[in-house]
Image: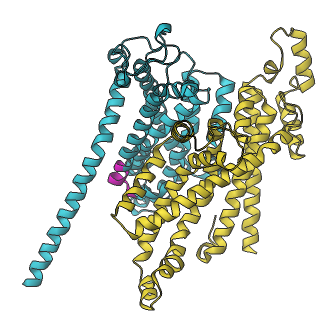
Chain colours: A cyan, B yellow
Amino acid sequence: MAAHAEAAIEVEARRSQVRSYITRRYLLVLPPMLIMIAFLIFGIFADVIAPGDPGQTHLLSRLEAPVFSGGTSEFPLGTDHVGRDIWTRIVHGARVSLIVVAIVVPGAALFGTAVGMFAGWRGGIVGQLLMRYVDVQLALPAILFAVLLGSVLGASLRNVIIILLIWTWTVYARLIRAEVLSLKEREFVVASLAAGGSNWWIMRKQLLPNVFNTIVVIMTLEIPIVIVAEASLSFLGVGAPVEQATWGRMITEARNYLTHAWWVMWMPGLALMLVALSGNLVGDWLRDLLDPRLRNLG
Amino acid sequence: MQFANLFLIRVLQTIVVIWVVVSIVFVVSRLIGNPETSLMPWDATNEDYERIREKLGLNDPMIVQYGKFLGDAVQGDLGFSYHRTGPAIDIVADKVLGTVKLTAAGLVVALGLGLPLGVFAALRRGSPMDWLARLIAVFGQATPSFWLGLMLIFFLATKVSWFPTAGSEGFRSLVLPAFALGLLSAAGFMRLTRSGMIDVMNTDFIRTARAKGLNERTVILRHGLRHALIPVMTILGIELGRLIAGSVIIEVVFSWPGIGRLMIESILQSDYPTVQAGLVVIAASITLGNLIVDMTYRVIDPRIRMAAL
Protein backbone atom coordinates (compact mmCIF):
# COMPACT_ATOMS: atom_id res chain seq x y z
CA MET A 1 0.00 0.00 0.00
CA ALA A 2 2.73 2.37 1.03
CA ALA A 3 4.77 1.46 -2.03
CA HIS A 4 1.71 2.07 -4.13
CA ALA A 5 1.17 5.50 -2.66
CA GLU A 6 4.84 6.33 -3.13
CA ALA A 7 4.66 5.34 -6.77
CA ALA A 8 1.56 7.48 -7.22
CA ILE A 9 3.30 10.43 -5.64
CA GLU A 10 6.30 9.87 -7.90
CA VAL A 11 4.12 9.77 -10.99
CA GLU A 12 2.38 12.95 -9.87
CA ALA A 13 5.74 14.63 -9.26
CA ARG A 14 6.93 13.57 -12.68
CA ARG A 15 3.75 14.90 -14.26
CA SER A 16 4.08 18.27 -12.63
CA GLN A 17 7.72 18.36 -13.70
CA VAL A 18 6.70 17.79 -17.31
CA ARG A 19 3.93 20.38 -16.96
CA SER A 20 6.25 22.99 -15.58
CA TYR A 21 8.74 22.20 -18.34
CA ILE A 22 6.06 22.76 -20.94
CA THR A 23 4.89 26.04 -19.41
CA ARG A 24 8.49 27.19 -19.15
CA ARG A 25 9.02 26.37 -22.81
CA TYR A 26 5.91 28.36 -23.75
CA LEU A 27 6.96 31.33 -21.65
CA LEU A 28 10.42 31.26 -23.21
CA VAL A 29 9.11 31.10 -26.75
CA LEU A 30 6.52 33.83 -26.27
CA PRO A 31 8.80 36.89 -26.69
CA PRO A 32 10.51 35.58 -29.85
CA MET A 33 7.09 34.63 -31.20
CA LEU A 34 5.83 38.18 -30.61
CA ILE A 35 8.92 39.59 -32.35
CA MET A 36 8.29 37.39 -35.39
CA ILE A 37 4.65 38.52 -35.46
CA ALA A 38 5.78 42.14 -35.22
CA PHE A 39 8.20 41.50 -38.10
CA LEU A 40 5.29 40.10 -40.13
CA ILE A 41 3.08 43.09 -39.36
CA PHE A 42 5.88 45.58 -40.11
CA GLY A 43 6.51 43.88 -43.42
CA ILE A 44 2.88 43.73 -44.51
CA PHE A 45 1.83 47.18 -43.34
CA ALA A 46 5.11 49.01 -43.99
CA ASP A 47 3.33 51.83 -45.83
CA VAL A 48 0.89 52.39 -42.97
CA ILE A 49 3.39 52.13 -40.13
CA ALA A 50 6.02 54.31 -41.81
CA PRO A 51 4.23 56.26 -44.53
CA GLY A 52 7.29 58.25 -45.61
CA ASP A 53 9.53 57.44 -48.57
CA PRO A 54 12.48 55.36 -47.30
CA GLY A 55 14.75 56.92 -49.92
CA GLN A 56 13.82 60.52 -49.02
CA THR A 57 16.98 62.43 -48.04
CA HIS A 58 17.09 65.39 -45.67
CA LEU A 59 20.46 66.94 -46.40
CA LEU A 60 20.15 69.45 -43.57
CA SER A 61 19.61 66.75 -40.94
CA ARG A 62 22.31 64.22 -41.70
CA LEU A 63 23.45 61.80 -38.98
CA GLU A 64 20.76 63.05 -36.61
CA ALA A 65 20.71 61.14 -33.30
CA PRO A 66 17.74 58.99 -32.29
CA VAL A 67 15.10 60.49 -29.99
CA PHE A 68 16.35 58.65 -26.87
CA SER A 69 19.85 59.90 -27.46
CA GLY A 70 19.15 63.62 -27.78
CA GLY A 71 17.44 63.69 -31.16
CA THR A 72 14.04 64.98 -32.19
CA SER A 73 10.83 63.01 -32.63
CA GLU A 74 10.85 63.86 -36.32
CA PHE A 75 13.38 61.05 -36.78
CA PRO A 76 12.67 58.60 -33.94
CA LEU A 77 15.65 56.37 -34.72
CA GLY A 78 17.84 59.11 -36.17
CA THR A 79 19.04 59.63 -39.74
CA ASP A 80 21.88 58.23 -41.83
CA HIS A 81 24.73 59.94 -43.69
CA VAL A 82 22.44 61.48 -46.32
CA GLY A 83 19.65 62.28 -43.90
CA ARG A 84 17.30 59.38 -44.57
CA ASP A 85 14.99 58.41 -41.75
CA ILE A 86 16.29 55.18 -40.22
CA TRP A 87 12.92 54.16 -38.76
CA THR A 88 11.22 54.34 -42.17
CA ARG A 89 14.08 52.45 -43.77
CA ILE A 90 14.01 49.69 -41.17
CA VAL A 91 10.27 49.18 -41.57
CA HIS A 92 10.58 49.06 -45.35
CA GLY A 93 13.64 46.83 -44.99
CA ALA A 94 11.45 44.41 -43.06
CA ARG A 95 9.12 44.35 -46.06
CA VAL A 96 11.97 43.39 -48.41
CA SER A 97 13.06 40.59 -46.05
CA LEU A 98 9.47 39.40 -45.74
CA ILE A 99 8.90 39.32 -49.49
CA VAL A 100 12.09 37.30 -49.94
CA VAL A 101 11.13 34.87 -47.15
CA ALA A 102 7.54 34.55 -48.37
CA ILE A 103 8.67 33.44 -51.82
CA VAL A 104 11.94 31.63 -51.13
CA VAL A 105 10.91 29.45 -48.17
CA PRO A 106 7.76 27.88 -49.69
CA GLY A 107 9.34 27.75 -53.15
CA ALA A 108 12.45 25.94 -51.94
CA ALA A 109 10.31 23.64 -49.78
CA LEU A 110 8.12 22.69 -52.73
CA PHE A 111 10.98 22.02 -55.10
CA GLY A 112 13.24 20.36 -52.53
CA THR A 113 10.44 18.11 -51.31
CA ALA A 114 9.55 17.07 -54.84
CA VAL A 115 13.16 16.18 -55.60
CA GLY A 116 13.66 14.45 -52.25
CA MET A 117 10.47 12.40 -52.67
CA PHE A 118 11.41 11.39 -56.17
CA ALA A 119 14.98 10.48 -55.26
CA GLY A 120 13.84 8.55 -52.20
CA TRP A 121 10.91 6.71 -53.76
CA ARG A 122 12.01 6.06 -57.32
CA GLY A 123 15.75 6.59 -57.00
CA GLY A 124 17.38 5.30 -60.14
CA ILE A 125 20.16 7.00 -62.02
CA VAL A 126 18.39 10.37 -62.11
CA GLY A 127 17.76 10.25 -58.36
CA GLN A 128 21.38 9.33 -57.71
CA LEU A 129 22.64 12.15 -59.90
CA LEU A 130 20.31 14.65 -58.24
CA MET A 131 21.50 13.63 -54.79
CA ARG A 132 25.18 13.77 -55.81
CA TYR A 133 24.52 17.30 -57.04
CA VAL A 134 22.88 18.11 -53.70
CA ASP A 135 25.93 16.75 -51.87
CA VAL A 136 28.27 18.88 -53.95
CA GLN A 137 26.22 22.02 -53.45
CA LEU A 138 25.87 21.49 -49.72
CA ALA A 139 29.62 20.96 -49.43
CA LEU A 140 30.52 24.23 -51.09
CA PRO A 141 30.40 27.80 -49.80
CA ALA A 142 27.01 28.92 -51.09
CA ILE A 143 27.86 32.56 -50.48
CA LEU A 144 30.53 32.57 -53.21
CA PHE A 145 28.24 31.09 -55.83
CA ALA A 146 25.52 33.47 -54.74
CA VAL A 147 27.81 36.47 -55.18
CA LEU A 148 29.02 35.14 -58.53
CA LEU A 149 25.46 34.66 -59.75
CA GLY A 150 24.43 38.01 -58.28
CA SER A 151 27.20 39.89 -60.04
CA VAL A 152 26.42 38.23 -63.37
CA LEU A 153 22.64 38.58 -63.16
CA GLY A 154 22.72 42.11 -61.76
CA ALA A 155 21.20 43.58 -58.63
CA SER A 156 17.45 43.10 -58.42
CA LEU A 157 15.04 41.63 -55.93
CA ARG A 158 13.99 38.98 -58.43
CA ASN A 159 17.60 37.81 -58.80
CA VAL A 160 18.09 37.69 -55.04
CA ILE A 161 15.06 35.42 -54.84
CA ILE A 162 16.35 33.17 -57.63
CA ILE A 163 19.76 32.93 -55.95
CA LEU A 164 18.29 32.08 -52.56
CA LEU A 165 15.97 29.47 -54.09
CA ILE A 166 18.99 27.76 -55.67
CA TRP A 167 20.85 28.17 -52.40
CA THR A 168 18.28 26.61 -50.06
CA TRP A 169 16.28 23.86 -51.81
CA THR A 170 18.98 21.23 -51.27
CA VAL A 171 18.40 21.04 -47.51
CA TYR A 172 14.82 19.85 -48.04
CA ALA A 173 15.84 17.41 -50.75
CA ARG A 174 18.42 15.68 -48.60
CA LEU A 175 16.28 15.37 -45.46
CA ILE A 176 13.06 14.37 -47.23
CA ARG A 177 14.91 11.74 -49.22
CA ALA A 178 16.31 10.24 -46.03
CA GLU A 179 12.82 10.22 -44.49
CA VAL A 180 11.25 8.60 -47.54
CA LEU A 181 13.97 5.95 -47.64
CA SER A 182 13.11 4.86 -44.12
CA LEU A 183 9.34 5.12 -44.70
CA LYS A 184 9.70 2.88 -47.72
CA GLU A 185 10.54 -0.06 -45.46
CA ARG A 186 7.58 0.46 -43.15
CA GLU A 187 4.74 -2.06 -43.21
CA PHE A 188 1.94 0.31 -44.15
CA VAL A 189 3.79 1.47 -47.23
CA VAL A 190 4.79 -2.04 -48.24
CA ALA A 191 1.18 -3.12 -47.70
CA SER A 192 -0.13 -0.32 -49.91
CA LEU A 193 2.27 -1.37 -52.63
CA ALA A 194 1.15 -4.97 -52.30
CA ALA A 195 -2.47 -3.84 -52.44
CA GLY A 196 -1.72 -2.20 -55.75
CA GLY A 197 -1.51 1.44 -54.71
CA SER A 198 -0.09 3.63 -57.45
CA ASN A 199 3.16 5.52 -56.89
CA TRP A 200 1.37 8.82 -57.04
CA TRP A 201 -1.26 7.73 -54.52
CA ILE A 202 1.32 6.40 -52.06
CA MET A 203 3.42 9.55 -52.32
CA ARG A 204 0.41 11.80 -51.80
CA LYS A 205 -1.52 9.85 -49.20
CA GLN A 206 1.18 8.06 -47.22
CA LEU A 207 4.58 9.64 -47.69
CA LEU A 208 3.61 13.30 -47.74
CA PRO A 209 1.58 13.28 -44.50
CA ASN A 210 4.45 11.49 -42.79
CA VAL A 211 7.11 13.96 -43.87
CA PHE A 212 4.88 16.98 -43.39
CA ASN A 213 6.15 17.77 -39.89
CA THR A 214 9.72 17.62 -41.09
CA ILE A 215 8.92 20.05 -43.90
CA VAL A 216 7.25 22.50 -41.53
CA VAL A 217 10.17 22.33 -39.10
CA ILE A 218 12.80 22.90 -41.80
CA MET A 219 10.75 25.76 -43.26
CA THR A 220 10.63 27.48 -39.88
CA LEU A 221 14.34 26.96 -39.30
CA GLU A 222 15.04 28.27 -42.80
CA ILE A 223 13.26 31.60 -42.20
CA PRO A 224 16.11 33.19 -40.19
CA ILE A 225 18.67 31.57 -42.52
CA VAL A 226 17.06 33.17 -45.57
CA ILE A 227 16.76 36.55 -43.83
CA VAL A 228 20.44 36.49 -42.88
CA ALA A 229 21.45 35.26 -46.35
CA GLU A 230 19.57 38.13 -48.00
CA ALA A 231 21.20 40.59 -45.61
CA SER A 232 24.62 39.09 -46.31
CA LEU A 233 24.14 39.49 -50.06
CA SER A 234 23.05 43.11 -49.60
CA PHE A 235 26.01 43.61 -47.28
CA LEU A 236 28.37 42.39 -50.02
CA GLY A 237 26.70 44.66 -52.54
CA VAL A 238 24.99 42.06 -54.76
CA GLY A 239 21.58 42.00 -53.10
CA ALA A 240 18.59 44.15 -53.79
CA PRO A 241 19.20 47.28 -55.92
CA VAL A 242 20.64 50.43 -54.32
CA GLU A 243 17.34 52.32 -54.19
CA GLN A 244 15.72 49.58 -52.09
CA ALA A 245 16.10 49.93 -48.32
CA THR A 246 17.41 46.62 -46.93
CA TRP A 247 18.96 45.89 -43.56
CA GLY A 248 22.12 44.46 -45.09
CA ARG A 249 22.72 47.51 -47.26
CA MET A 250 21.96 49.87 -44.38
CA ILE A 251 24.63 48.11 -42.33
CA THR A 252 27.23 48.29 -45.13
CA GLU A 253 26.60 51.97 -45.75
CA ALA A 254 26.88 52.72 -42.04
CA ARG A 255 30.29 51.14 -41.58
CA ASN A 256 32.16 54.37 -42.25
CA TYR A 257 30.19 56.26 -39.60
CA LEU A 258 30.76 53.68 -36.91
CA THR A 259 32.80 55.90 -34.65
CA HIS A 260 30.73 59.07 -34.53
CA ALA A 261 27.17 57.92 -35.34
CA TRP A 262 26.71 54.50 -33.82
CA TRP A 263 22.94 54.35 -34.38
CA VAL A 264 23.22 54.26 -38.16
CA MET A 265 24.74 50.78 -37.97
CA TRP A 266 23.18 49.60 -34.74
CA MET A 267 19.53 50.13 -35.62
CA PRO A 268 19.39 47.86 -38.68
CA GLY A 269 21.92 45.50 -37.07
CA LEU A 270 19.79 45.09 -33.96
CA ALA A 271 16.68 44.57 -36.08
CA LEU A 272 18.46 41.85 -38.04
CA MET A 273 19.88 40.19 -34.95
CA LEU A 274 16.57 40.29 -33.11
CA VAL A 275 14.66 38.72 -35.98
CA ALA A 276 17.36 36.10 -36.65
CA LEU A 277 17.51 35.17 -32.97
CA SER A 278 13.72 35.04 -32.60
CA GLY A 279 13.35 32.98 -35.75
CA ASN A 280 15.90 30.52 -34.43
CA LEU A 281 14.23 30.21 -31.04
CA VAL A 282 10.78 29.69 -32.55
CA GLY A 283 12.25 27.16 -34.97
CA ASP A 284 13.99 25.25 -32.16
CA TRP A 285 10.78 25.19 -30.18
CA LEU A 286 8.72 23.94 -33.09
CA ARG A 287 11.31 21.29 -33.86
CA ASP A 288 11.26 19.97 -30.29
CA LEU A 289 7.48 19.97 -30.43
CA LEU A 290 6.95 18.34 -33.81
CA ASP A 291 10.07 16.45 -34.74
CA PRO A 292 12.68 16.02 -32.01
CA ARG A 293 14.69 13.62 -34.18
CA LEU A 294 15.89 16.58 -36.24
CA ARG A 295 17.67 17.89 -33.18
CA ASN A 296 21.20 16.84 -34.08
CA LEU A 297 21.16 18.23 -37.57
CA GLY A 298 22.89 21.37 -36.40
CA MET B 1 42.41 -3.06 -48.75
CA GLN B 2 38.95 -1.79 -47.92
CA PHE B 3 40.46 1.30 -46.43
CA ALA B 4 42.42 1.93 -49.61
CA ASN B 5 39.25 1.46 -51.65
CA LEU B 6 37.40 3.97 -49.53
CA PHE B 7 40.25 6.40 -49.93
CA LEU B 8 40.19 5.97 -53.69
CA ILE B 9 36.43 6.54 -53.83
CA ARG B 10 36.79 9.72 -51.83
CA VAL B 11 39.59 11.01 -54.04
CA LEU B 12 37.39 10.37 -57.09
CA GLN B 13 34.54 12.21 -55.37
CA THR B 14 36.87 15.15 -54.78
CA ILE B 15 37.72 15.27 -58.46
CA VAL B 16 34.03 15.17 -59.39
CA VAL B 17 33.29 18.02 -56.97
CA ILE B 18 36.01 20.15 -58.52
CA TRP B 19 34.76 19.34 -62.01
CA VAL B 20 31.25 20.41 -61.03
CA VAL B 21 32.59 23.64 -59.52
CA VAL B 22 34.61 24.48 -62.60
CA SER B 23 31.65 23.72 -64.84
CA ILE B 24 29.26 25.86 -62.80
CA VAL B 25 31.63 28.79 -63.00
CA PHE B 26 32.05 28.21 -66.72
CA VAL B 27 28.32 28.14 -67.33
CA VAL B 28 27.63 31.16 -65.17
CA SER B 29 30.43 33.29 -66.58
CA ARG B 30 30.24 32.37 -70.28
CA LEU B 31 26.57 31.72 -70.82
CA ILE B 32 25.01 34.36 -68.61
CA GLY B 33 27.78 36.90 -68.28
CA ASN B 34 29.86 38.77 -70.85
CA PRO B 35 33.49 38.63 -69.79
CA GLU B 36 34.56 41.03 -72.54
CA THR B 37 32.44 43.98 -71.46
CA SER B 38 34.25 44.23 -68.15
CA LEU B 39 37.61 44.25 -69.93
CA MET B 40 37.01 47.06 -72.35
CA PRO B 41 37.06 50.81 -71.80
CA TRP B 42 33.70 52.57 -72.15
CA ASP B 43 34.58 54.06 -75.52
CA ALA B 44 35.59 50.76 -77.16
CA THR B 45 34.30 50.27 -80.70
CA ASN B 46 32.56 47.21 -82.07
CA GLU B 47 35.78 46.20 -83.81
CA ASP B 48 37.62 46.35 -80.47
CA TYR B 49 35.02 44.02 -78.98
CA GLU B 50 35.32 41.69 -81.94
CA ARG B 51 39.11 41.61 -81.54
CA ILE B 52 39.01 40.76 -77.84
CA ARG B 53 36.32 38.12 -78.37
CA GLU B 54 38.52 36.53 -81.02
CA LYS B 55 41.59 36.72 -78.78
CA LEU B 56 39.83 35.14 -75.79
CA GLY B 57 38.23 32.50 -77.98
CA LEU B 58 34.74 33.69 -77.11
CA ASN B 59 33.55 33.33 -80.71
CA ASP B 60 34.09 29.58 -80.77
CA PRO B 61 31.06 27.35 -80.21
CA MET B 62 30.30 26.85 -76.51
CA ILE B 63 31.24 23.20 -76.55
CA VAL B 64 34.67 23.96 -78.05
CA GLN B 65 35.24 26.65 -75.44
CA TYR B 66 34.28 24.22 -72.69
CA GLY B 67 36.58 21.50 -74.02
CA LYS B 68 39.52 23.87 -74.31
CA PHE B 69 38.79 25.27 -70.89
CA LEU B 70 38.63 21.83 -69.25
CA GLY B 71 41.79 20.72 -71.04
CA ASP B 72 43.66 23.75 -69.72
CA ALA B 73 42.19 23.31 -66.25
CA VAL B 74 43.40 19.71 -66.03
CA GLN B 75 46.91 20.98 -66.67
CA GLY B 76 46.53 23.49 -63.86
CA ASP B 77 46.08 26.40 -66.24
CA LEU B 78 43.06 28.49 -65.28
CA GLY B 79 43.91 31.42 -67.48
CA PHE B 80 45.25 34.89 -66.79
CA SER B 81 43.52 37.32 -64.51
CA TYR B 82 41.59 40.00 -66.38
CA HIS B 83 42.40 42.71 -63.86
CA ARG B 84 45.62 41.77 -62.13
CA THR B 85 48.86 40.73 -63.75
CA GLY B 86 49.77 37.08 -63.86
CA PRO B 87 48.09 33.69 -64.01
CA ALA B 88 44.90 33.51 -61.95
CA ILE B 89 46.06 30.50 -59.99
CA ASP B 90 49.22 32.33 -58.82
CA ILE B 91 47.20 35.31 -57.66
CA VAL B 92 44.98 32.99 -55.63
CA ALA B 93 47.98 31.03 -54.31
CA ASP B 94 49.35 34.30 -52.92
CA LYS B 95 46.29 34.62 -50.70
CA VAL B 96 46.03 31.03 -49.52
CA LEU B 97 48.17 31.57 -46.45
CA GLY B 98 45.91 34.40 -45.23
CA THR B 99 42.79 32.25 -45.43
CA VAL B 100 44.53 29.25 -43.89
CA LYS B 101 45.67 31.39 -40.96
CA LEU B 102 42.20 32.82 -40.43
CA THR B 103 40.44 29.46 -40.73
CA ALA B 104 42.92 27.79 -38.38
CA ALA B 105 42.48 30.56 -35.83
CA GLY B 106 38.70 30.25 -36.20
CA LEU B 107 38.93 26.52 -35.55
CA VAL B 108 41.07 27.14 -32.48
CA VAL B 109 38.43 29.55 -31.15
CA ALA B 110 35.61 27.14 -32.00
CA LEU B 111 37.22 24.15 -30.27
CA GLY B 112 38.84 26.16 -27.48
CA LEU B 113 35.51 27.71 -26.58
CA GLY B 114 33.12 24.92 -27.51
CA LEU B 115 34.75 21.91 -25.84
CA PRO B 116 35.48 23.31 -22.35
CA LEU B 117 32.11 25.09 -22.24
CA GLY B 118 30.37 21.89 -23.27
CA VAL B 119 32.17 19.83 -20.63
CA PHE B 120 31.52 22.33 -17.84
CA ALA B 121 27.90 22.74 -18.85
CA ALA B 122 27.41 18.97 -18.83
CA LEU B 123 29.11 18.43 -15.47
CA ARG B 124 27.13 21.17 -13.76
CA ARG B 125 23.76 20.96 -15.41
CA GLY B 126 21.44 23.82 -14.51
CA SER B 127 24.28 25.85 -13.01
CA PRO B 128 24.95 29.44 -14.08
CA MET B 129 27.82 28.07 -16.19
CA ASP B 130 25.36 25.83 -18.02
CA TRP B 131 23.03 28.75 -18.68
CA LEU B 132 25.91 30.90 -19.88
CA ALA B 133 27.08 28.18 -22.24
CA ARG B 134 23.61 27.71 -23.67
CA LEU B 135 23.15 31.45 -24.04
CA ILE B 136 26.41 31.67 -25.96
CA ALA B 137 25.28 28.74 -28.10
CA VAL B 138 21.95 30.37 -28.94
CA PHE B 139 23.55 33.72 -29.75
CA GLY B 140 26.42 32.13 -31.64
CA GLN B 141 24.02 30.18 -33.78
CA ALA B 142 21.71 33.08 -34.54
CA THR B 143 23.96 36.11 -34.99
CA PRO B 144 25.00 36.75 -38.59
CA SER B 145 28.79 36.56 -38.67
CA PHE B 146 29.27 39.90 -40.42
CA TRP B 147 27.15 41.61 -37.81
CA LEU B 148 29.08 39.89 -35.02
CA GLY B 149 32.30 41.10 -36.63
CA LEU B 150 31.02 44.67 -36.80
CA MET B 151 29.91 44.56 -33.16
CA LEU B 152 33.34 43.31 -32.13
CA ILE B 153 34.96 46.11 -34.11
CA PHE B 154 32.61 48.63 -32.53
CA PHE B 155 33.23 47.57 -28.93
CA LEU B 156 36.79 46.29 -28.91
CA ALA B 157 38.41 48.30 -31.69
CA THR B 158 36.70 51.71 -31.57
CA LYS B 159 35.26 52.09 -28.04
CA VAL B 160 38.41 50.65 -26.47
CA SER B 161 41.30 50.19 -28.86
CA TRP B 162 42.39 46.76 -27.74
CA PHE B 163 42.50 45.39 -31.24
CA PRO B 164 42.97 46.97 -34.69
CA THR B 165 39.78 47.52 -36.72
CA ALA B 166 41.16 45.84 -39.83
CA GLY B 167 44.26 44.56 -41.56
CA SER B 168 46.61 41.73 -40.79
CA GLU B 169 49.59 43.02 -38.86
CA GLY B 170 50.59 40.71 -36.07
CA PHE B 171 48.71 38.46 -33.74
CA ARG B 172 46.36 41.08 -32.33
CA SER B 173 44.71 41.74 -35.67
CA LEU B 174 43.82 38.04 -35.89
CA VAL B 175 41.86 37.93 -32.62
CA LEU B 176 38.62 39.64 -33.65
CA PRO B 177 38.21 37.98 -37.06
CA ALA B 178 38.99 34.58 -35.55
CA PHE B 179 36.39 35.11 -32.87
CA ALA B 180 33.75 36.38 -35.29
CA LEU B 181 34.43 33.38 -37.50
CA GLY B 182 34.66 30.74 -34.81
CA LEU B 183 31.66 31.54 -32.63
CA LEU B 184 29.10 29.82 -34.85
CA SER B 185 31.10 26.60 -34.89
CA ALA B 186 31.85 26.93 -31.19
CA ALA B 187 28.10 26.85 -30.59
CA GLY B 188 27.80 23.61 -32.55
CA PHE B 189 30.74 21.98 -30.75
CA MET B 190 29.39 23.13 -27.40
CA ARG B 191 25.98 21.56 -27.99
CA LEU B 192 27.42 18.24 -29.11
CA THR B 193 30.03 18.04 -26.35
CA ARG B 194 27.42 18.87 -23.75
CA SER B 195 24.90 16.25 -24.85
CA GLY B 196 27.68 13.71 -25.42
CA MET B 197 29.16 14.27 -21.97
CA ILE B 198 25.76 14.02 -20.29
CA ASP B 199 25.17 10.65 -21.97
CA VAL B 200 28.64 9.31 -21.22
CA MET B 201 28.79 10.34 -17.58
CA ASN B 202 25.72 8.18 -16.87
CA THR B 203 27.23 4.99 -18.28
CA ASP B 204 28.44 1.98 -16.34
CA PHE B 205 32.06 2.25 -17.31
CA ILE B 206 32.27 5.72 -15.80
CA ARG B 207 30.88 4.31 -12.57
CA THR B 208 33.47 1.53 -12.78
CA ALA B 209 36.23 4.03 -13.36
CA ARG B 210 35.12 5.94 -10.28
CA ALA B 211 34.78 2.71 -8.27
CA LYS B 212 38.36 1.84 -9.20
CA GLY B 213 39.32 4.98 -7.31
CA LEU B 214 40.53 7.01 -10.26
CA ASN B 215 40.57 10.69 -9.56
CA GLU B 216 37.75 12.74 -11.05
CA ARG B 217 40.03 14.50 -13.51
CA THR B 218 41.09 11.23 -15.11
CA VAL B 219 37.53 9.97 -15.15
CA ILE B 220 36.30 13.07 -16.93
CA LEU B 221 39.12 13.59 -19.37
CA ARG B 222 40.40 10.08 -20.15
CA HIS B 223 37.15 8.14 -19.91
CA GLY B 224 34.35 10.64 -20.39
CA LEU B 225 35.57 13.25 -22.83
CA ARG B 226 37.19 10.71 -25.12
CA HIS B 227 33.81 9.17 -25.80
CA ALA B 228 31.97 12.45 -25.98
CA LEU B 229 34.41 13.57 -28.66
CA ILE B 230 33.29 10.96 -31.19
CA PRO B 231 30.16 12.85 -32.32
CA VAL B 232 32.24 16.03 -32.29
CA MET B 233 34.63 14.40 -34.74
CA THR B 234 31.79 13.61 -37.14
CA ILE B 235 30.86 17.25 -37.52
CA LEU B 236 34.46 18.47 -37.56
CA GLY B 237 34.59 18.06 -41.34
CA ILE B 238 31.33 19.93 -41.83
CA GLU B 239 32.42 22.68 -39.45
CA LEU B 240 35.76 23.00 -41.23
CA GLY B 241 33.89 23.55 -44.47
CA ARG B 242 31.66 26.09 -42.76
CA LEU B 243 34.70 27.93 -41.40
CA ILE B 244 36.32 28.11 -44.84
CA ALA B 245 33.04 29.35 -46.32
CA GLY B 246 32.49 31.77 -43.45
CA SER B 247 35.96 33.22 -43.85
CA VAL B 248 34.79 34.85 -47.10
CA ILE B 249 32.50 37.35 -45.42
CA ILE B 250 34.76 37.77 -42.37
CA GLU B 251 37.66 38.66 -44.67
CA VAL B 252 35.51 41.37 -46.23
CA VAL B 253 34.42 42.75 -42.85
CA PHE B 254 37.96 42.90 -41.48
CA SER B 255 39.78 43.67 -44.76
CA TRP B 256 41.74 40.50 -44.19
CA PRO B 257 43.96 39.54 -47.14
CA GLY B 258 42.70 36.10 -48.14
CA ILE B 259 41.03 34.17 -50.93
CA GLY B 260 37.55 35.22 -49.88
CA ARG B 261 38.12 38.95 -50.16
CA LEU B 262 40.09 38.45 -53.38
CA MET B 263 37.17 36.49 -54.81
CA ILE B 264 34.49 38.97 -53.81
CA GLU B 265 36.57 41.73 -55.41
CA SER B 266 37.16 39.61 -58.51
CA ILE B 267 33.49 38.70 -58.80
CA LEU B 268 32.47 42.34 -58.64
CA GLN B 269 35.10 43.15 -61.32
CA SER B 270 33.94 40.22 -63.48
CA ASP B 271 37.46 38.80 -63.31
CA TYR B 272 36.25 35.27 -64.04
CA PRO B 273 39.60 33.43 -64.31
CA THR B 274 40.50 34.55 -60.79
CA VAL B 275 37.02 33.61 -59.54
CA GLN B 276 37.40 30.20 -61.11
CA ALA B 277 40.83 29.63 -59.60
CA GLY B 278 39.62 30.75 -56.19
CA LEU B 279 36.55 28.53 -56.25
CA VAL B 280 38.63 25.54 -57.30
CA VAL B 281 41.10 26.12 -54.48
CA ILE B 282 38.31 26.55 -51.91
CA ALA B 283 36.33 23.53 -53.15
CA ALA B 284 39.48 21.42 -53.15
CA SER B 285 40.43 22.45 -49.64
CA ILE B 286 36.93 21.82 -48.27
CA THR B 287 36.68 18.35 -49.79
CA LEU B 288 40.28 17.60 -48.80
CA GLY B 289 39.55 18.71 -45.24
CA ASN B 290 36.49 16.46 -45.23
CA LEU B 291 38.59 13.58 -46.52
CA ILE B 292 41.22 13.97 -43.80
CA VAL B 293 38.62 14.27 -41.05
CA ASP B 294 36.71 11.29 -42.38
CA MET B 295 39.81 9.10 -42.51
CA THR B 296 41.02 10.15 -39.05
CA TYR B 297 37.57 9.42 -37.72
CA ARG B 298 37.70 5.90 -39.09
CA VAL B 299 41.09 5.34 -37.47
CA ILE B 300 39.82 6.58 -34.09
CA ASP B 301 36.52 4.69 -34.04
CA PRO B 302 36.92 1.12 -35.32
CA ARG B 303 33.16 0.53 -35.23
CA ILE B 304 32.61 2.60 -38.32
CA ARG B 305 35.92 1.90 -39.98
CA MET B 306 34.41 -0.39 -42.58
CA ALA B 307 30.96 1.12 -42.71
CA ALA B 308 29.75 2.47 -46.00
CA LEU B 309 30.37 6.08 -46.88
Please name whichever residue, A169 or A140, is drawn nearer the observer in this view of the structure.
A140
Q: Is residue A97 magenta?
A: no
Residue appearing at x 47%, y 14% in the figure: A84
In this rendering, is residue B94 above or below A76? below
Q: Position of residue A240 (x, y in %)?
A: 55, 23
Residue at 68% across, 32% down = A148
Can residue B286 be seen in this snapshot? yes
When the figure is inspected, residue B1 is found, relative to residue B101, above or below; the finding is below
Residue at 72% x, 51% y is B100
Q: Position of residue A152 (x, y in %)?
A: 69, 25
Residue B53 location, quadrant = top right
The residue sitting at the left extreme is: A1
What x and y, as percent, mark residue B140?
48, 48
Range shown magenta: A285-292
Q: Is residue B285 above or below residue B63?
A: below
Q: Give yes or no for residue A288 being in the magenta stretch.
A: yes
Task: State the residue in front, A137 or B255.
Answer: B255
What kind of secondary structure does the magenta stretch mostly adopt? helix
Q: In this rendering, would B54 be left or right of B33?
A: right
Residue B239 location (% of width, % of height): 59, 54
- The image quadrant where one finds the N terminus of chain A is bottom left
Q: Nearer the viewer, residue B74 or B281?
A: B281
* Residue A146 quadrant: top right
